[in-house]
Amino acid sequence: MVKVLRGVRGAITVESNNSTMICESVVELLTSMVTANNIETEDIGAVIFSSTSDLNSAFPAVGARSLGWNEVPLFGTQEIENPSGISKCIRVLILWNTDLPQRSIKHIYLRDAISLRQDIKEKEDANR
């Protein structure tokens, strides 16, 4: 089967603006995303991180590097400040080469970040 580029989305909130907590949260999120989708790092084209302006103690990419993602291209940016947005949040987009159809991709939203995707929360609740 032919592999195509797919996007795997995820987000997590962090308790406080602390470099250790930021890195640990990124590790938790990436581990969940990789596990849920059976992602092999050699199939990752790139990873884009964004974080809210209230998280500036560490670059989220540092968490990915701690997982050994040294060959994966990583990019970080800052979210716009939106009055109705969620605070202390890191978002991730993994660009992944896979033979799975888009509908089979599992997007992961942890902690308060689940509020970003109510459709996923409702689907999870219905499956319980």
Image (cartoon, grey):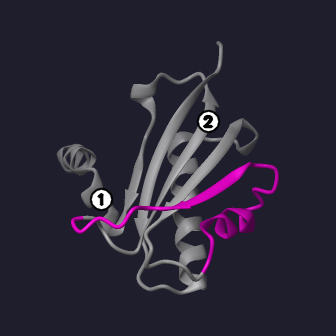
Q: Which residue is mark 1?
A: 114
Q: Residues within 10 Å of mark 1 (few under 14, many from 20)?
A: some
Residues 128 and 117: in front is: 117
Residues at discs 2 and 1 in contact (Cβ within 8 Å): no
Q: Which mark is residue 8?
A: none
Could you say where residue 115 lies in the image, as x and y percent from the top left? 25, 59
Q: Is residue 26 left or right of residue 45?
A: left
Which residue is pictured at 69% across the width and 38% down the height? 45
Secondary structure under the numbered disc 2 in the rendered image: strand
Secondary structure under the numbered disc 1 in the rendered image: helix
Could you say where residue 122 lies in the image, as x and y percent from the top left? 19, 47
First in sequence: mark 2 vs mark 1 = 2
Q: Residue furthest right?
A: 71
Could you say where residue 34 lies in the image, as x and y percent from the top left? 58, 48
- Magenta region includes residue 87: no
Which residue is pictured at 60% across the width and 38% down the height? 95
Which residue is pictured at 59% across the width and 21% down the height? 99
Quarter residue 46 falls in: top right
Q: Which residue is mark 2?
A: 96
Q: Residues within 10 Å of mark 2 (few under 14, many from 20)?
A: many
Could you say where residue 11 lies in the image, as x and y percent from the top left? 43, 58
Q: Which residues are magenta?
A: 58-84
Which residue is pictured at 58% across the width and 51% down the height? 48
Q: How much space separates mark 2 and mark 1, taking CA atoms?
A: 22 Å
Identify the amino acid type marked 1.
Answer: Ile
Q: Is residue 72 left or right of residue 115?
A: right
Identify the amino acid type marked 2.
Answer: Trp
The number of numbered discs placed on residues in the rendered structure image is: 2
Q: Is residue 43 left or right of residue 81?
A: right
- Magenta region includes residue 82: yes
Q: Which image quarter holds the N terminus?
A: top right
